[in-house]
Amino acid sequence: MSIKNYILFIGGMIVGMVLILPFLKWLGIPLSFANVLVYMFGEPDNAKKIIVSLFLILLVSLIVLIPKSKYMKSS
């Protein structure tokens, strides 16, 4: 990477930390995945834990299997 790319990367990080995160907090958008799950499913109890676990297993399997299947087709 060149010096220009490093400067753009650091500038983007600063803009993200200084401008974007407070703006998202001001809008009330959750910033962590745990907060998103609480926002979607509410406070945890036994039934919701099972639903969230199945949702996470599905999400992780899609994240892993889709690129793997595309990789297998390309080779």
Image (cartoon, helix red, strand yellow):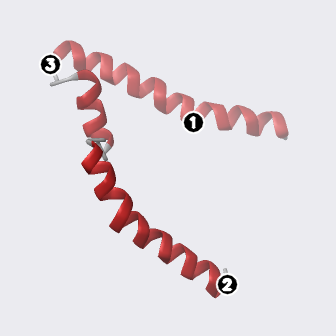
> How busy is the neighbourhood of tag 3: few (under 14 within 10 Å), some, or many (20 plus)?
few
- The mark found on residue 43 in the picture is none
Looking at the rendered structure, the kind of residue marked 3 is Asp
As helix, strand or loop, the secondary structure at mark 3 comes to loop
- 1 and 3 marks in contact (CB < 8 Å): no
Residue visible at 30% across and 35% down in the picture: 36
- The mark found on residue 45 in the picture is 3
> In which quadrant of the rendered image does the C terminus lie?
top right
Provide residue 56's location: percent of width, then percent of height. 39, 28
Provide residue 44's location: percent of width, then percent of height. 16, 23
Q: Is residue 63 above or below residue 3?
A: above
Between the C-alphas of marks 3 and 2, the distance is 51 Å
The foreground one among 16 and 68 is 16
> In which quadrant of the rendered image does the N terminus lie?
bottom right
Looking at the rendered structure, the kind of residue marked 1 is Val
Q: Find residue 32 and report its image quarter.
A: top left
> How busy is the neighbourhood of tag 2: few (under 14 within 10 Å), some, or many (20 plus)?
few
Between the C-alphas of marks 1 and 3, the distance is 28 Å
> How busy is the neighbourhood of tag 1: few (under 14 within 10 Å), some, or many (20 plus)?
few
- 1 and 2 marks in contact (CB < 8 Å): no
**Residue at numbered disc 2:** 2
Q: Tell whether 58 sits left or right of 53.
A: right
**Residue at numbered disc 1:** 64
Looking at the rendered structure, the kind of residue marked 2 is Ser
Mark found first going from the N terminus, 1 or 2: 2
Q: Tell whether 38 sits left or right of 75.
A: left
